Amino acid sequence: MKREQCLLCETVQYSLDDHMLILNAAADPFVRQLVELFASSSATGRVTLAEDNVALAHELLTLAKHAQTVQHAAFHDYSEHAIPATIDVAAMNLLYQPNNSWMHYGLQMALYLLKVGGRLYVVGAKDRGILTIAKRMEQLFGEVETLEISKGQRVLLARKSAATKATTVGATLPVFADNKLDEGTRLLLAALEVHAADDVLDIGCGAGLIGLHIARLASKGNVTMVDVSLAAVAASQQAIAESQLANIRVAASDGAQAVLTQCFDLVVTNPPFHQGGIQTTAIAERFIREAAQVLRPQGRFYLVANRFLKYEPVLRASFQDVEEVGGDTRYKVLRATRPQHSNMS
C-alpha cells in the first residue's frame, strides 16, 4: 500500500484497550486494518463505526464476523444515543464527508464524546477544506498539531483537555441539498409518465422529493424508495410522515439490493456521480442494471444525468429501447423500456 493512500495507518496511535470512534470514514484503508485487528485479537476495547453508508458498514461487520468488538451506528444522529466522554480515539477523513456541515458535525461529535485526554485525528487535502477544519479544531480543542503532510494531504491531531468546553452536539445533521428541487430533478419530474396504479421504485432517493411527487400521482399504487445513506433514509421518513401519504415507504439499501425479488411498473433515479470525491459512472451503471432486473416487461425506467455522462451504452445493454425524453443544455432525461432481463411478473 502506498503511503499517501493510508496516512492514518501510520499516524493514529491507539491500543487494543481503547474505544475507537470512526466518523463516517469506513472507506478509509485504516478502518479496514483497524476492524481486522480488533476482530481477530484479544482486544478489550472496541471500534464504533459511526457510518452513514450501510453498504460499507455491512462490509466491515461481515469482515469482523460480527465480533462484539466492532459496532455500527448511524453517523447523523449517533451523539443522541452515545454516552459523552467515553471515546479514547476518534478519526475522520474529510474525503468521505459530503459537505462542510458533515465535517463540522464530526468535529462537534468528537468533542462531545472524547474523554479528557482523548485524541481526534483528521486527514484531508487542501481542496477538501483541511486548512479551514484546522482552524475550527483549534477553536474547539485549543492546540492542533500537524502530524504529516504528503502530496497535499495532511493529518491533524487535537487533544481534549480538562479546560475544553464540550457542550452537547445539538440537532442532528442536516442532510443534503436534496430537500430543495434541483434542476435535474425538476426536469425528471416534468418528463415522467406516472399511472395511478403503478408500483414504483426510486433508487437513491435522497431526501425523498421524487418519490413523494410520484406517490401523489400513483394514488392507487405504491412507491418504494431506497438509499444507501442512513441520513437520507431518515430525511425521507420524516418527509413521508409530514406528507401523511400512506402509499409510500423507504428502506436503507445498497442500490436496489433490498428489493431485487420485487417487481415494479416504474423505476426512477437521479444517481450520484461522485464517490469519495472522485467522479464515477459506476453507481449509475449499477442502478441501470438493477432497474432492468426489477422492472416488469412493460415497465418504464427513467434516469436524469448531466449531459456529458455517457450512460446510453449501458442502458442499451440492459434495455431494448432507449430514448431521450427531456432535458436542457446541462441535463438529459433518458427513458428505457423493454428490459433484457426483467423479473417476469
Image: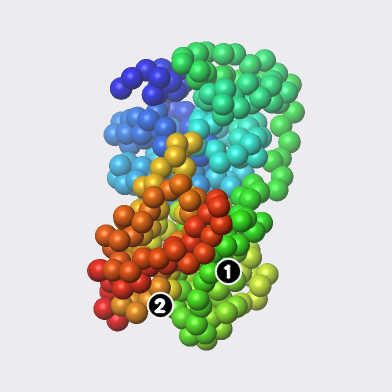
Report the side of 286 relative to 73 (left or right). Answer: left
Q: Nearer the viewer, residue 243 or 142?
A: 243
Q: Amino acid at mark 1?
A: Ala
Regarding residue 84, the answer to whether it shows in the image is no
Task: Say which mark, if any, is on residue 153.
Answer: none
Task: Give the x, y percent position of residue 196.
Answer: 52, 85
Q: Which residue is mark 2?
A: 265
User: In the rendered image, which quarter contains the N terminus?
Assistant: top left
Q: Which residue is mark 1?
A: 190
On screen, 108 above or below 156? below
User: In the rendered image, which quarter contains the C terminus?
Assistant: bottom left
Q: Quadrant location of residue 318?
A: bottom left
Identify the residue shown where x is 40% and y is 23%: 6
Identify the residue shown where x is 32% and y is 34%: 36
On screen, 324 above or below 111? below
Regarding residue 204, the answer to whether it shows in the image is yes
Q: Nearer the viewer, residue 217 or 141?
A: 217
Task: Give the x, y percent position of residue 292.
Answer: 32, 66
Q: CA distance from mark 2 to mark 1?
A: 18 Å
On screen, 268 above or below 198? above
Identify the residue shown where x is 61% and y is 50%: 176
Q: Nearer the viewer, mark 2 or mark 1?
A: 1
Q: Earlier in the sequence, mark 2 or mark 1?
A: 1
Q: Amino acid at mark 2?
A: Asp
Identify the residue shown where x is 55% and y is 52%: 329
Question: Residue pushed farthest front?
Answer: 329
Task: Give the x, y percent position of residue 319.
Answer: 30, 66
